[in-house]
Every structure is written in C-alpha cells, then in structure tokens.
Amino acid sequence: MAAKPPQTINIRVRYAETDKMGVVYHANYFVWFEMGRCELLRAIGRSYREMEASGIGLPVIEAHCEYRSPAKYDDELMVRTTGKLISRTRVEFEYEITRPLDSTVNAVGRTVHAAIDTTGRPCRLPDYIRELLE
C-alpha cells in the first residue's frame, strides 16, 4: 500500500554536507528524507505549508536510517520516497538513497509521523494524505 507512484528527487552532495574524511555526515540523510517527504506531498498538489496552515502538523515520532555505502562530495544521488498509512492518525515514509551512476544503495530508512492539531493533540490525517497512501 505504498504511495503511487513513489516520488524521486535528484540531489548533488555539497562540500558542506561532508565530514573531515570527505564522506557525507550521517545527519544529512535525515535532511534528504525530509526533502523526499516534502516533494511527495508537492507531487499531489499539496505542501507541508498548506497542511500546517490548515492546523495540522506531522511531527516525526520515530526515525531510522541504515547506512550501506558512503556518499561523497559531488556524488549525484537519487532519493526515492514512498508512504503508507499506519492508522487514521499515523503515517510512515520509507526512503532509499542511491547513486545512479553505479546503482549503489547508500542508505535506506523510514520515519513515522503522527498528525497533531494546533494544541498538540492527536488528530485524523487529512483526507488527501489518506487517499494518497491507501
């Protein structure tokens, strides 16, 4: 029951995203996961900004990343994002970051998000998100 179709974005590793060893610093993968989530919503004609303006937030309540092969400065990478409903109030996104040049999988991960209202209380996910992921 993944989002149809998965959303992909292309990025190029910037020098500032690497550590002293020339390898992408681990926390940057979570930034790229966020970019993938945002583009998945944008691909259906919505955005985080619109969702938040309507009074619904989607904070991360769980995050996981498995690092498989290091990415380095100037690598061209592809971030593939899919999503699925867990419940009426929770959604899970899955990510795969690859280097298309040689088909290397650099990292895979997932995040779980809970829908909350402006008071921070759980609420139902918007219909357009449920429809996207059902």
Image (spheres, grey):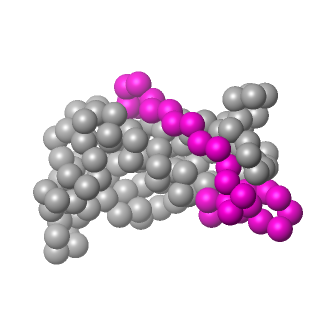
Q: Is residue 68 visible?
A: no
The reply to whether the magenta stretch includes residue 7 is yes
State the residue in front, 7 or 65: 7
> Image quadrant for the C terminus?
top left
The picture places residue 76, in percent across and down from the top left corner, at: 68, 38
Classify residue 43 as left or right of residue 22. left
Residue at 46% from the left image edge and 53% from the top image edge: 34
Outermost residue, top side: 5
Vertical arrangement, residue 62 with respect to residue 87, above or below: below
Residue at 25% from the left image edge and 55% from the top image edge: 49
State the residue in front, 89 or 51: 51
Classify residue 104 as left or right of residue 60. right
The picture places residue 118, in percent across and down from the top left corner, at: 16, 70
> Image quadrant for the N terminus?
top left
State the residue in front, 89 or 16: 16
Residue at 61% from the left image edge and 59% from the top image edge: 28
Q: Is residue 78 visible?
A: yes
The picture places residue 52, in percent across and down from the top left corner, at: 22, 59
Residue at 51% from the left image edge and 36% from the top image edge: 9
Could you say which quadrant of the image residue 69 lies in?
top right
Stretch in magenta:
1-28
The picture places residue 66, in percent across and down from the top left corner, at: 68, 51
